[in-house]
Image (cartoon, rainbow, N blue to C red):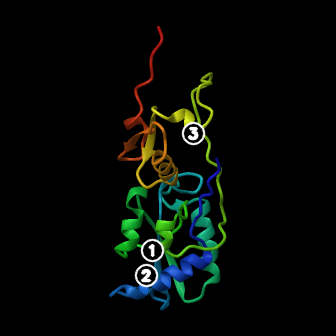
């Protein structure tokens, strides 16, 4: 089963910046008079968005937005590290005016946010299991089993949607921090 992950890109950023920033009571401009657009992205999602050794946000999504910024007169982008589970709250509260992250386009999100028609990135969804385990080949094979999940993540949304019609729902174990270690059992030790 394939699921494309859509991200906000050039047209989305421009449209979203105008829409959301226009609703704000505080306009922000830099010394050059450019309108400052705060772009939210994660700082722990390599290779797409992460903090480098100098603690500067970088990665494919950030580099893509920097290329847009170079071509867009009258605007300057500032990059803000935002945890994934707070990304849309930050957007709605105008702490950021755009998102540069791996964002799936869903009908619910399309009602609230602007998306581009085309994405600059698409990903295939796969199931990874422990080497040698052959009983899990499809999403149906996950029914009744526990699976790690991050609230709001596009893959979690896919599993939640699947559960609506599943014969036996997949047990979703939600991570608060996004760190799998808090939801996965400790590794077994062999003596």
- Above or below — where is 28 with respect to 146? below
Task: Determine the secondary structure under disc 1.
Answer: helix
Q: Residue 77 placed where, x, y %? A: 51, 76
Earlier residue among tags 2 and 1: 2
**Rendered residue at 40%/25% (across/down):** 186
Direction from residue 31 to residue 95 in the image, left or right:
left
Tell me the residue that label 3 is attached to: 139
Q: Residues within 10 Å of mark 3 (few under 14, many from 20)?
A: some
**Rendered residue at 64%/53% (across/down):** 123
Q: Residue 71 placed where, x, y %? A: 65, 82
Foreground disc of the pair 3, 2: 3
Measured in 3D between alpha carbons, the distance from the residue under mark 3 to the one under mark 2, in whole angstroms, is: 38 Å
Q: Which label number is shown at residue 131?
A: none
Task: Determine the secondary structure under disc 3.
Answer: helix
Tell me the residue that label 1 is attached to: 112
Foreground disc of the pair 1, 3: 3
**Rendered residue at 48%/11% (across/down):** 190
Q: Residue 174 placed where, x, y %? A: 38, 43
Earlier residue among tags 1 and 3: 1
Task: Determine the secondary structure under disc 2.
Answer: helix
Earlier residue among tags 3 and 2: 2
Q: Residues within 10 Å of mark 2 (few under 14, many from 20)?
A: some
Tell me the residue that label 2 is attached to: 20
Q: Quadrant of residue 117?
A: bottom right
Q: Is residue 36 visible?
A: yes
């Amino acid at each position: 089963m394939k699921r494309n992950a859509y991200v906000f890109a050039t047209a989305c950023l421009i449209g979203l910046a105008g829409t959301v920033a226009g609703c704000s009571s505080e306009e922000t401009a830099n010394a050059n008079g450019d309108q400052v657009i705060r772009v939210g992205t994660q700082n722990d999602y390599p290779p797409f968005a992460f903090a480098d050794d100098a603690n500067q946000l970088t990665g494919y999504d950030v580099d893509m937005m920097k290329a847009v910024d170079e071509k867009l007169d009258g605007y300057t982008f500032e990059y803000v590290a935002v945890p994934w589970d707070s990304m849309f709250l930050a957007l709605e509260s105008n702490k950021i005016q755009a998102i540069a992250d791996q964002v799936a386009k869903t009908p619910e999100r399309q009602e609230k946010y602007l998306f581009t028609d085309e994405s600059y990135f698409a990903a295939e969804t796969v199931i990874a299991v422990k080497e040698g385990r052959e009983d899990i080949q499809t999403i149906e094979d996950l029914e009744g089993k526990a699976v790690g999940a991050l609230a709001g993540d596009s893959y979690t949304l896919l599993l939640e949607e699947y559960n609506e019609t599943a014969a036996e729902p997949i047990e979703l174990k939600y991570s608060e921090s996004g760190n799998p270690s808090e939801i996965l059992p400790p590794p077994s030790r062999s003596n």
